[in-house]
Amino acid sequence: MGGAPATLVQLALIVLFIAPGVTYQLLRERRRGSKPGEQDIAQRVLRALIASVVLDAIYVLLIGPELISSFEPGRGWDGLRQHSRSAAALILVLVFAVPVGVAWGVSELERRRLRSSYRSTPTAWDHAFRDCPPSFVRIRLKDGSWIGGWYGSKSYATSFPHPPELFLERSYRMKSDGSFSAEVTRSMGMYVKCTEIDFFEILANSESGGV
């Protein structure tokens, strides 16, 4: 057990080195939305490591002497044990608060700079259903047939990076011209595999009564 304190100090240093970038990367993805290139785990790890290096370099520039003195040989474990609350507060600030603030600030600057072209949603499919109100949806399949249904609170559309799929809570019979007929009775909903879709349309609420 004699080596435990030194090991714990080393572990704390590793966490302080890596965790800020991980926190930054997670919030950036949350604020900006997922990008195709970031689905590669190696790309995500690399981005997090780069962010950690940048943040840690800033920490050293600003409070380097204080950080180094806290982990000097023979003082590291005693310093943490005697000032555990201060150490916990420091970890919260350096590992969470600062990376979150930086990620939020960078995301806001990016949104303002690219306001005319930037979109946090990665695909048109995500954009269509992200804030979609309850609506009728009509779909023409690749074989030329029509299907349609009601997209409501119990419906679901997948989002990136998952392949486009749709569940409509109510299904309707469709006429050959794509107009709606009677609702299918006793239906528990309709699943649509979107690789079979040739065309789909979301009808505004104001038009729903005339479907």
Image (cartoon, rainbow, N blue to C red):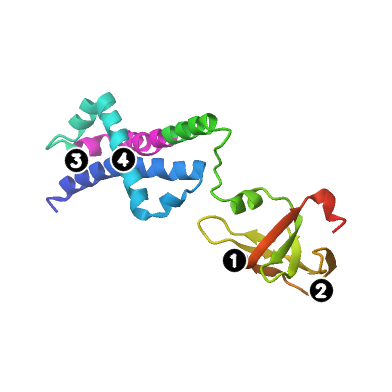
Q: Position of residue 56 (x, y in %)?
A: 28, 34
- Marks 4 and 2 close (CB-CB < 8 Å): no
Residue 185: mark: 2
Where does label 3 land, which residue? 77
Q: Position of residue 130 (x, y in %)?
A: 63, 49
Q: Report the span colored magenta.
A: 78-100
Residue 24 at least partly seen: yes
Q: Earlier in the sequence, mark 4 or mark 1?
A: 4
Residue 153 at least partly seen: no
Q: Earlier in the sequence, mark 3 or mark 2?
A: 3
Would residue 31 appear left or right of 175 to someone viewing this image?
A: left
- Marks 2 and 1 close (CB-CB < 8 Å): no
- Image point 73% across, 70% down: which residue? 145
Residue 105: mark: none
Q: Which label sits in the foreground, 3 or 1?
A: 1
- Distance from Cα at disc 4 to Cα at disc 2: 57 Å
Q: Position of residue 168 (x, y in %)?
A: 70, 64
Q: Residues within 10 Å of mark 2 (few under 14, many from 20)?
A: few
Q: Earlier in the sequence, mark 3 or mark 4?
A: 4
Q: Earlier in the sequence, mark 2 or mark 1?
A: 2
Q: Earlier in the sequence, mark 4 or mark 2?
A: 4
Residue 161 vertical placement versus 176 (above, below): above
Where does label 4 land, which residue? 50
Where does label 1 land, which residue? 195
